[in-house]
Amino acid sequence: MVSHFKKALLTSAVIAAFIAQGCGTEAPKDTRATDEIAIRQQSMAWTNAAQSHDMDKVLSFYAPDAVALPDGASIALNKDAIRAVWQNFIGNKNVTLSWKTTAVGVAKSSDIAYEYGAYTMDVVGKDGQTSTQTGKYLLVWKKQADGTWKVAVDTDNSDAPPPAPAPPVRTAHHAAAKKHRRHH
Amino acid sequence: MRTSPTNPVARIVKLSAALALAVGSLVLASCNSTPAPKDTRAADEAAIRAASKAWSDAAQAKDVDKAVSFYATDGIQLTDKGPLVDDAATLHAGWQKMLALPGPGLSLQTSKVEVAKSGDVAYEYGAYDFAVADSAGKITDQKGKYVVIWKKQTDGTWKAAVDINNTDAPPPPAPAPAAKPAAHNSAKRRKHH
């Protein structure tokens, strides 16, 4: 009788474990590591599209409700406005833009993530000389219903401006003030 | 094999069914008592908007220590026309310099806040106004945009993990004596990646 009871106990434990397993699936899975990889791949595919001056492909990385906050221009609140921002240099073969991810952070719930990094813009002048500008960018990524990550917010700013050509000593203070005025 | 009420196999089956039911309901009961994390997004958004307002007020009050207190300990700033700043001393020095400029100074106006379902990460973007007085006391407003990535800290407060801003107006044309080709200048202005 006791051994029967033991067997019953064992069997019930197995059944209870199955029930508990079903309960466990209620908790959301932590997918942050794979999400970060997916976002880094998206960012790389995006910079490749920009380097090949593929406008449609470039725009395909934005979520339908994306906004862009471009440096030196007003906020772009829809796809047409975002296209116009890109047109200025995607449409110009003398301008090549590329960027590199520095860090990605994903929310535990994997619905929102952010990425920041550094960009480089090469401009070939009329004289054939290439000038390079560098800057920083910040992106907010959102997971879409189909599981892909798209850009919801896109912004950037430039690094230190190139040194002014031979500034007179007395304007040095003014230049320093100018440099910090935009600092927020 | 036949089963009957006296059959040991039938006894095991009965007993295990009863026990499984008892243990199973206990497990389920405890499972229900620890439901999915609560959705705190509405309260989180209100807290972030309040923090952003307090940050703007601190800037208006030229309170450097208060202004930098809104950054997380590992918070960074992607400084406009400057480098990526990831240490507290440089961050403090940058704010000190900016808040020392004459005039009403910096104010922020939130446009949007969105919080992740898990309530650990959020973003905010908005518009800033930087009012600077010249030597004659004339105030010039510089307008721009900002984005902040907020992270909930262990004490429940929200702090800025990443902070970036840029100007609405394009930079003034380079003061180079010789006129540069127009195409080159307009391309230069488009720094948007």
Image: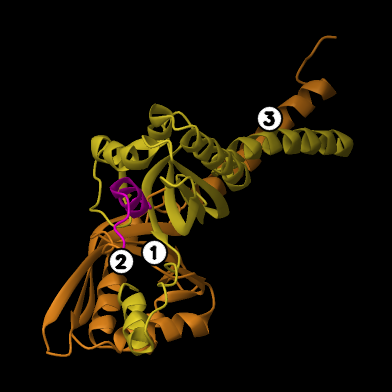
Residue drawn at the location 31% of the way across and 84% of the way down: A174
The amino acid beneath tag 1 is: Ile
Label 3 sits on a secondary structure element that is helix
Task: Kindly indicate the quadrant of the structure image that contains residue A57.
Answer: top left
Q: Nearer the viewer, mark 3 or mark 2?
A: 2
Find the magenta span and give its range. Answer: B176-191
Q: Which residue is mark 2?
A: B177
- Count the numbered circles shown: 3
Q: Are marks 1 and 3 on the same chain?
A: yes
Q: Quadrant of the N terminus of chain A?
A: top right
The amino acid beneath tag 2 is: Pro
Q: Which residue is mark 1?
A: B164
Q: Is residue B153 visible?
A: no
Q: Looking at the image, do the residues carrying marks 1 and 3 touch, with CB atoms under 8 Å apart?
A: no
Q: Quadrant of the C terminus of chain A?
A: bottom left
Label 2 sits on a secondary structure element that is loop
Q: Is residue B108 magenta?
A: no
Instruction: Give the chain ID for the orange colour.
Output: B
State which chain disc 2 sits on: B
Q: State the residue in front, A157 or A24.
A: A157
Q: Which residue is mark 3?
A: B17
